[in-house]
Amino acid sequence: MTRMVLALIFTGIIALFIPSCLTADVLLIEEVRQSGRLEVPDNGVTSRDVRARFGDPVKVHNPIGDPPITRWEYGQWSVYFEHDVVLFTVLHKGAVIDKKTE
């Protein structure tokens, strides 16, 4: 009888921890697929070319570090510069999710 009670208690304790072990992150595959539709600056382009092609940014952050890294924010993405050359462009969360239902 004692073994039966201990087995039930042990099973109950394990059952409490199972839901926390079964959580997972959601990968936004559809967002990644749709990101190809956005036009963003290519790596290696100058800040002058970015401004000429995409216009003035919504916000310009001050340079940080050495070498200086600057971030320009646009509506759906931000572009990072080292001196005046594009390092990379980052899409803002949810920027390309297509809200249409088909």
Image: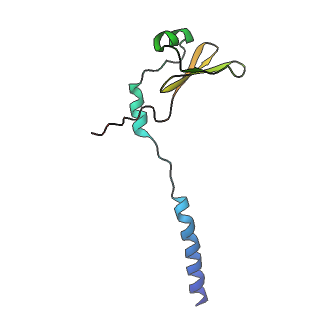
Is residue 5 left or right of 99 when viewed as pictured? Answer: right
Question: Is 11 located above or below residue 59 in the figure?
Answer: below
Is residue 78 left or right of 63 when viewed as pictured? Answer: left
Nearer to the camera, 63 or 6: 63
Q: Which residue lies furthest to the bottom in this view?
A: 1
Residue at 59% x, 86% y is: 3
Q: In which quarter of the image is residue 47?
A: top right
Question: Is 57 located above or below residue 99 in the figure?
Answer: above
Q: What colour scheme has been applied to the protein in the rendered image?
A: rainbow
Is residue 56 left or right of 30 when viewed as pictured? Answer: right
Q: Could you say where residue 84 lies in the image, as x and y percent from the top left? A: 61, 12
What count of labels does the image hold? 0
Q: Which residue lies furthest to the right in this view?
A: 66
Question: Is 3 located above or below residue 55 in the figure?
Answer: below
Q: In which quarter of the image is residue 97?
A: top left
Residue at 46% x, 43% y is: 27
Q: Which residue lies furthest to the left in this view?
A: 102
Nearer to the camera, 84 or 72: 72
Nearer to the camera, 22 or 71: 71
Q: Could you say where residue 63 lies in the image, as x and y percent from the top left? A: 67, 19
Q: Could you say where residue 96 lies in the image, as x and y percent from the top left? A: 42, 32
Is residue 82 left or right of 57 when viewed as pictured? Answer: right
Q: Quadrant of residue 60?
A: top right
Q: Could you say where residue 25 lies in the image, as x and y percent from the top left? A: 50, 48
Q: Quadrant of the N terminus?
A: bottom right
Q: Quadrant of the C terminus?
A: top left
